[in-house]
Amino acid sequence: MAKIAGEWQTATIADGQSKTSEIDLGGSYDFVQVLIPSTITACNMSLEAALETAGTFYRLGSSDNVAAVDAAAHMQVFLLGKFRYIKVVSSVAQASGDTILVRGIN
């Protein structure tokens, strides 16, 4: 039986960068839940996904899979489509080395 939710993973968008390093969700999931801190710079947030670790990452989905994020702590759920390896992407470089939490959910 597939897990309903994976373990929380910590990921950072480094100061001056616009995406996290690779995140291994520990399994393939339908959705990914992202907890976003209040320190985030306002942006559009999306995902990239790869078929294997250190593989080629592709922008995931269309405008339906982009979330407008303001400078307030909140949670966002993205459609993932059974990928395991992801990156969280910001439309602008972040200024404070923001740490986010992510986990896969079914």
Image (cartoon, rainbow, N blue to C red):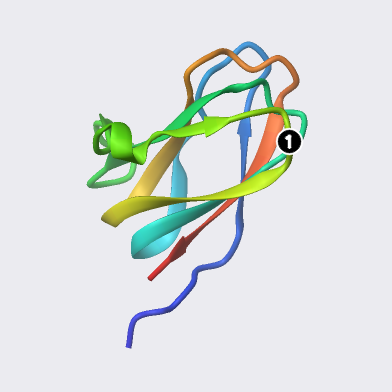
In the foreground, 100 or 43: 43
Instruction: Specify the quadrant of the image occupied by residue 98.
Output: top right
Q: Residue at x 39, y 34 (%)?
A: 66
Query: Which quadrant holds the C terminus?
Result: bottom left
Measured from the top left, where is residue 24 in percent x and y? 44, 51
Measured from the top left, where is residue 50 in percent x and y? 27, 41
Instruction: Specify the quadrant of the image occupied by residue 32.
Output: bottom left
- As displayed, is residue 41 above or below residue 72? above
Measured from the top left, where is residue 94 in percent x and y? 64, 17
For label 1, the residue is 72
Q: Residue at x 57, y 66 (%)?
A: 7
Q: Residue at x 67, y 21 (%)?
A: 41
In the foreground, 18 or 63: 63
- In the image, what residue type sits under mark 1? Ala
In the foreground, 45 or 96: 45
Q: Residue at x 64, y 22 (%)?
A: 14
At label 1, counting other C-alpha atoms closer than 10 Å, the crowd grade (few under 14, some 14-19, many 20 or more) is: few
Measured from the top left, where is residue 53 in percent x and y? 33, 44
